[in-house]
Image (cartoon, grey):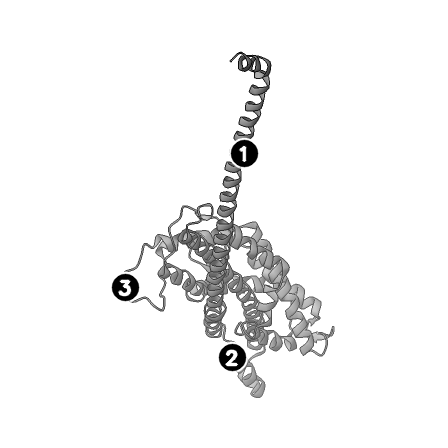
Amino acid sequence: MLSLRDFWRRHRRKVFITFGVLGSGYLLHKLYDAYRRRLADLERELAGERENDELIKAQLQAHFDNIQRIADMTTLPHAMHYFSSRVVEELDLSHLTERLLKGKGQPNTLTSTEKLELWDRLKILSFTRMVLSLWAMTMLNLYIRVQVNILGRHLYIDTARGLGSSHLLEEADPIDRYSQQQFLASADFLSNYGMPGLISHMQAAATEVLKGKQLRDLFSTSVLHETILQILDMFMSTGKPHHWIDYLMPEDAGSYEVATPSSSDNTIHSDDTKFDQLMVETRAVLSSAEFGSVVEISLKTVVNALMEDIGVQAGGGLFPGMPLAKLLPRVAQMGPLLLEEPSKNRFIQIIRNIPEVELFFTLLYANMPTL
């Protein structure tokens, strides 16, 4: 017994240290094991979130591709065809050319003053029709792409909500199918309601720019190029800021009625505030400085491409000696070319391939806020 006490007195410090080390080691082992299990749980959670995000991206891409196809194959072709037919109706030049041809065949049927008046009207309307077609083709293309990207963003949010990914959710109600159709169908606003004002203001701009240009004046490619840009600039800059937006979409979406293919009098429609929300977002984008820059770049690019086409038709370029009167038939022919269906319209493809345009719509789709 004494030996045990003597052993304890002599070695108790070592015993305490040994048990302390063993206890600490055991505790560290338990802590490390708990940390390792927690780390494994976190890795599984992260892997699950990554898989969920990939699923969201795949479904998002499917949603966006589907609505993009709707725009490319249905919305834009329909809007372009409808607008083209309205231009033919509202800016018909045949009555002027017929009267001039009749006066040429029967000299006594028109006085010199009447001939000059007819030629002046033909000059104004030819340029009005060409520049209006150029502007409308560009703006319909951009406007419908804005619609598609805004709608795609909402579908992104709806998809994230459906998959329960909390960090992707935003506080917003889903956009129902009827509101989507109503929103896309509003692309016909220009043809149905915006056409009279557009023609009036474009014709006023053309009249102002062309008033000092006589039929015998010689036009070159550079002169024609500058004339078109002047008409566009005068049209875009005259009036209140962003006045041209009112030709593309209603100022008050709440009072605008849209007929959609699937709607009928017996259909019970959802809350129209969804449609209003989409239209408010669209107007905000169209009013932005970034979109204004995209419009300016697109219009100038299309004018440059148009000059190339006219130059080819003229045998490599408009030589400095073509009277304006001789140029007018070619100017009039450009309108229908600019409004060809999208699958055949090289100007639409040119706009889509402009780097600034591609970047703008990429950022719009990724960053569009939900109001």
Q: Nearer the viewer, mark 2 or mark 3?
A: 3
Q: Is residue 276 above or below residue 79?
A: above
Q: Is residue 280 left or right of residue 237?
A: left
Q: Secondary structure at mark 1?
A: helix
Sequence-earlier tag: 2 or 3: 2
The tag on residue 267 is: 3
Q: Which residue is mark 1?
A: 29
Does the image show residue 273?
yes
Indicate the quadrant where residue 298 lies: bottom right
Corner quadrant of residue 7: top right
Amino acid type at mark 3: Thr
State which quadrant residue 207 falls in. Answer: bottom right
Residue that appears at 45% across and 57% down: 151
Residue at the location (62% across, 59% down)? 297
Between marks 1 and 3, how big is the CA–CA gap?
68 Å
Residues 135 and 172: in front is 172
Q: Which residue is mark 2?
A: 94
Separation of marks 2 and 1 at Cα, in angstroms: 94 Å
The answer to whether 310 is drawn above or below residue 359 in the figure is: below
Q: Residue at coordinates 55% horizontally, 76% vertically from top-left? A: 114
Query: Mark 3 or mark 1, which is nearer the start of the sequence?
Result: 1
- The amino acid beneath tag 1 is His
Residue 329 coordinates in the image, percent (x, y): 60, 77
Whichever of callouts 2 and 1 sits on the residue coming sooner in the sequence is 1
